[in-house]
Image (tube, helix red, strand yellow):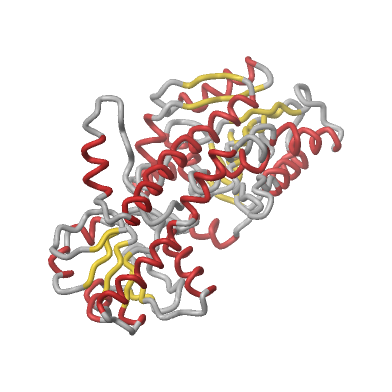
Amino acid sequence: MINVIGLGYIGLPTALMMASHGVEVVGTDYNKELVATLNAGKTTFKEKGLDELFDAAVKAGIRFTTEYQVTDTYIVSVPTPYDKFSKKVDACYVVAAVKDVMKVCPKGATVVIESTVSPGTIDKYVRPVIEANGFKIGEDLNLVHAPERIIPGNMVYELLHNNRTIGADDRAIGEKVKEYYASFCQGEIVVTDIRTAEMTKVVENTFRAVNIAFANELAKICRHDNMDVYEIIRICNMHPRVNILQPGPGVGGHCISVDPWFLVGDYPSLAKLIDQSMRINDGMPDFVLNRIYEIMKEKGMTDITRVGLYGLTYKENVDDMRESPTLQLLESQERHLATGLKVYDPFIEKDVVANQYHNLDEFLAAVDFVVIMVKHNEIKENMDKLAGKVILDCHNICQLPGVYHI
């Protein structure tokens, strides 16, 4: 049996996938309300294919509880935030989970840490805790790192098809854990050492963050001299060895906007390019806010309450708001002692910010100026409803005349 610890955006799909492919799984989370929701037969977030996967896992016998189980294998999938001052990973949730595992696990159990961590985190924080509790690593407890590689909006498909990395102290233990993931994973599964596995996950997201930053910096340069960044990127990408990404209003989620900071925090004198790239991306919500005020001034608009932000999530067609550029923009507005922007997102039903609407038509009726922060399918399929509005399109998806861009 596998006990999956942490039933959030990564832990829950992983537990469901294993259970639906013949592995006995018990999911554990300290959040009683979350566990109660799952036991009532409901998923806790929206994701394509997740409800069907949930039903298959329940039929296969998956169980959900707040209690840690006595078993030989644990998968720890808890949050790993970072300290916004030092930029270092905060491993407190991982350490707490490992401590709780040690209270119940039998001798020789394996702990698989799936949470994303910075290189060396397991050496710095996890091993000392295990040894301080009198456990001998490799005998009493085995350590493995198996970082996830999935993205909200396409989790189920990517769990099935993406390649995986398994880092282990002992090759034989790594191969055993590989068999669990191979129960559903159709991609290649590479077994390596723990530190390499830690580094590869962070580097993958850092590569993406740096490339996004290049596109965002191009947008700023082009805006400064009134050039069309989208046309420039389109032409440049006709070169066989050039593939520039598209700029946007910022970077959110709990991967690209967080993981690269781990390297900055651990290697501040070396990770200069990464540091600057992250600052560029983090500065985009402020850049968009400044564009809003520029356009308002140009149009002679004075009422900020007639301006609406479309989209609260960090990416299109999901309900995940973690590190959302829109939330960052609203926080920035508050720091400048200004409020009043209207907000709407079809995927967010609960009131999470002020002036939030829950219907597109009502939202559009309340605003004269629409800022497209997220390219949900809904807005792409209803562009005609924006006719007559002032539009700041942060994703270059609107073809109406007179549209402003970042």
The structure residue drawn at horizontal position 70% and vertical position 29%, both measured from the top left corner, is 109
Can you give x and y, in whole percent of width and height, for residue 21 in the image?
43, 32
Looking at the picture, how far across and down is residue 365, in whole percent?
A: 22, 80
Q: Which residue: 67% across, 45% down?
A: 88
Q: For this rendering, which residue is in front, 336 or 122?
A: 336
Q: Residue at x 15, y 58 (%)?
A: 399
Of the 4 image quadrants, the one containing the N terminus is top right
Q: Name the quadrant containing residue 27.
A: top right
Residue 278 in percent (x, y) is at 52, 47
The front one of 312 and 190 is 312
Q: Is residue 204 left or right of residue 346?
A: right
- Asked if residue 171 is positioned above or below residue 354 in the image, the reply reads above
Q: Quadrant of residue 126?
A: top right
Image location of residue 76, percent across then percent down = 62, 40
Of 182 and 389, nearer the camera is 389
* Quarter of the figure that contains the C terminus: bottom left
